[in-house]
Image (cartoon, grey):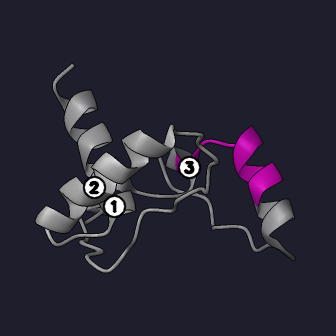
Amino acid sequence: MSKKLKPSFQGEAEERKFWEAHDSTDYVDWNKAERVRLPNLKPSSVSISLRLPVSLLERIKVAANKRDMPYQSLIKAWLAEKLDRQ
């Protein structure tokens, strides 16, 4: 089956609406696709508010200081480790 020409769009919203209703296999030959690496991409993050007892936060800061890393980074690392074990 021959592929259709890729449509052009006036903006991102128009493109999003189009792809929600159409299958990319009609427009792209995925057999010719190549894998790419994007090593400089950083995962997006979201700020949250987390209430901790002062004593717990102080203990976390001491542990982070021993590891020579910011305490928020240590909290993220611990959370990721815990989730990876599940």
* Position of 83 relative to 7 (above/below): above
Query: What stretch of residues is rendered in magenta?
Result: 16-24
Q: Which residue is mark 1?
A: 71
- Quickly name the residue at label 3: 24
| Residue at 31%, 69% in the rendered image | 70
Circle 3 Cα neighbour tier, 10 Å, few/some/many (<14 / 14–19 / ≥20): some
Q: Would you identify the image quadrant in which residue 15 lies? A: bottom right
Q: Nearer the viewer, residue 36 or 47?
A: 47
Residue at 72%, 67% (x, y): give it. 7
Nearest the eye: 32 or 9? 9
Q: In the rendered view, would you say 1 is above or below 83? A: below
Pick out the residue farthest to the front. Answer: 55
Can you give x and y, in whole percent of width and height, for residue 36 in the image? 25, 71
Residue 84 locus on image (x, y percent): 20, 31
> Amino acid under label 1?
Tyr
Give the image location of residue 49, x and y in percent: 64, 47
SS at circle 1: helix
Which mark lies nearer to you, 3 or 1? 1
| Mark 1 neighbour density, 10 Å: few (under 14) some (14–19) many (20 or more) | some
Q: Give the amino acid at mark 3.
A: Ser
Q: Per the image, is 7 magenta?
A: no
Residue 24 vs residue 56: left or right?
right
Tell me the CA gap for discs 3 and 2: 41 Å
Q: Amino acid at mark 2?
A: Leu
Residue at 31% over, 58% down: 61
Is label 1 in contact with label 2 (beta carbons under 8 Å)? yes
Other-residue count near label 2 (Cα within 10 Å), few / some / many at <14 / 14–19 / ≥20 = some
> Earlier along the polypeptide chain: callout 3 or callout 1?
3
Residue tagged 2 = 74
